[in-house]
Amino acid sequence: MNSFVRHRYAGLTLSLAFGFGCGDDASHVTRAQAGRASVAPPQGDGGASGDDTPGGTPAAGGDPAAAGKQTTGGRAGVSGGSATQSGGSAGRSVTDPGGQRGREQGSAGEATGGTSTTTDAGDGGQAGGSESSAGNGDGGASAEPLGVVLVPGFSERKWIHSTHGGDLVLEEALTGFASLTPPKTRVRRLTRERETKAEWAAPDDQYISDFCEHPSGELSLVLRSSSFEFALVRLDAGLDLLQMSTLHDPAVATDPHAAEAGASDLVANGLLNDAARIGAFGEDVFAVAVSSINAVIGYRARFSAGQWAEPERTLIEPPVALAPFLPIGGSFDTFGAIGEWFRTPLDIDENGNAYVAVWANPSRIRNHAQLFQDGLTPLPGDPALPNAGDSDVLLTKLAPSGERVWSRVVGTEHEDEPYAIRAQGGFVAVAGRSRRFPSFDNTAWDALLSVTTAAGDATDTLSLELDASSILLGVDTRPGGGFVVAGSDGWSQNPDGLSILSFGQKLLLELPTLDEPPVRVALPAGPRHNELHAVRTTLDGIALAGHEDGPLTHSGDGDATEIHANGVLAFVPP
């Protein structure tokens, strides 16, 4: 029997204000969803195993727990950062040993009313998370009944519902992680049929790390070049270029430890392309970038009279030495997991406050506390492995002015990785994955969802144990309360490295409350590897963006043409 485990810390039992109660028998949740197809099992082995070695990292010790074993509850969900904010709710683990939760029955193809394929290709893009806006413009809610649209050769990374004549998507043509040139990227405005109404493709030496839309219909983008520079781009509503401006920041030389590292201007982290995020508040933008010395810096910028004004900076996290966990073989970075330590999910709430999530090992948390003097410490780890060195997530809120409001530590008792964030309705949800077994055992990872209030108060942290491994890459709030999360599950990972070894399936979960088992929305699995990167809820249903027929870590080892995918834009009615 599965159960939710609730812990009490500092005499506090914390629960989410919109009514999450405790469920005790998750294995019997089988809510049928009319018209939703059953989920196909994972589709076989995707590559060789045992060939990854963590660079400079000790080998895993001990035997992993048996598959399906119920994990213990996590650690404190939030570590407060001041004398008046020190409590935290318990992290909790949800198990699904037989993979039976939410196995709705139905025939594949009924989920979304069939499949159509667009023939226009283009230059893809990379950005995580999801964003939505009100209104029903061309290509918006009225286009949803089209069901699944495939975009051959691309991965859909972001989908915004626009009020200015067609939804907007960010797309990427997948390439191997050893490529010296950035993957081709583009932003497209869609017609009602989800074909191309307008398109802006990044120059060959540039990569679109993220984009956002303004009330005027104009778009702002943040790019990363092959020469490791960041740039801000402004497009009009028709996706015509208004201005591109390289983002310089000589003030990086004044950040802690920057002088000894020789930093004199903003230089992008060289490990990944999407080391920046951007969000809109009115016609202004707030962008977050990870520098070459691993500082996390926020930039507030205004575009007026056809020009970008000088950005105002906020140091969110000081520089820190991080030795990346790298494979010694392979050709593709599935989930972008290799660079996850150097990525910063960002969202902006209705009031213009920005929320940034950062992967944080104990060293990063110590550096943070030394600089900001807010008392943050790592969350309690596994008592059986007090020196395991597992990592948490640093969550920071910034006011519309760019001023720091608060920082909190969220996560579970094992290592956590943030991949998406959503701030809306007074709550902030961080989604990603959490290591199932302690220390350096990479055998299995579980879906992670940690929720905090906009005031910085703890609510809850969930670790969802599904079939094999799972990861959440997108999160949104539900119109009736709770959350919807999306990602991939059913895959497996090299116990001693980063190789993803078997194909994953599309993962979509509804959590009307955090104290009840999630309801799995069954989706038809495409060929090879499946991922959902963004989820957007409306009163009419759930919109999804991702890819299928994707590669795994070793898919392109012998043949680089195997590194490809077909983008998926899908809509699931209520």
Image (cartoon, grey):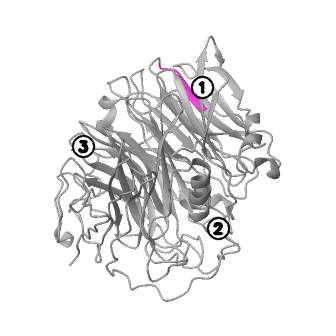
* Crowd band around label 2 with a 10 angstrom C-alpha radius: few (<14), some (14–19), many (20+): some
Q: Please, what secondary structure does the residue beneath circle 3 have?
A: loop
Residue at x 32% of width, y 60% of height: 89
Q: Please, what secondary structure does the residue beneath circle 2 have?
A: loop
From the viewer's side, name the closer residue of 282 and 40.
282
- The residue beneath circle 2 is 325
Choose mark 1 or mark 3, whichever is in front.
1
Residue at x 70% of width, y 50% of height: 269
Q: Position of residue 290 (x, y in %)?
A: 64, 46
Disc number placed over residue 573 in the picture, else none: 3
Choose mark 2 or mark 1, whichever is in front.
1
Disc number placed over residue 301 in the picture, else none: 1
Q: Earlier in the sequence, mark 2 or mark 3?
A: 2
Say which amino acid is labelled 1: Ala
Q: Earlier in the sequence, mark 1 or mark 3?
A: 1
Let me know if residue 160 is in the magenta part.
no
Q: Position of residue 389 (x, y in %)?
A: 56, 72
Q: Residue furthest top?
A: 305
Bounds of the magenta span?
217-221
Residue 151 left/right relative to 207: left
Q: CA distance from mark 1 to mark 3?
A: 38 Å
Q: Earlier in the sequence, mark 2 or mark 1?
A: 1
Residue 91 left/right relative to 309: left
Q: CA distance from mark 2 to mark 3?
A: 40 Å
Say which amino acid is labelled 2: Phe
From the viewer's side, name the closer residue of 122 and 497.
497
Give the quadrant of the N terminus.
bottom left
Say which amino acid is labelled 3: Pro
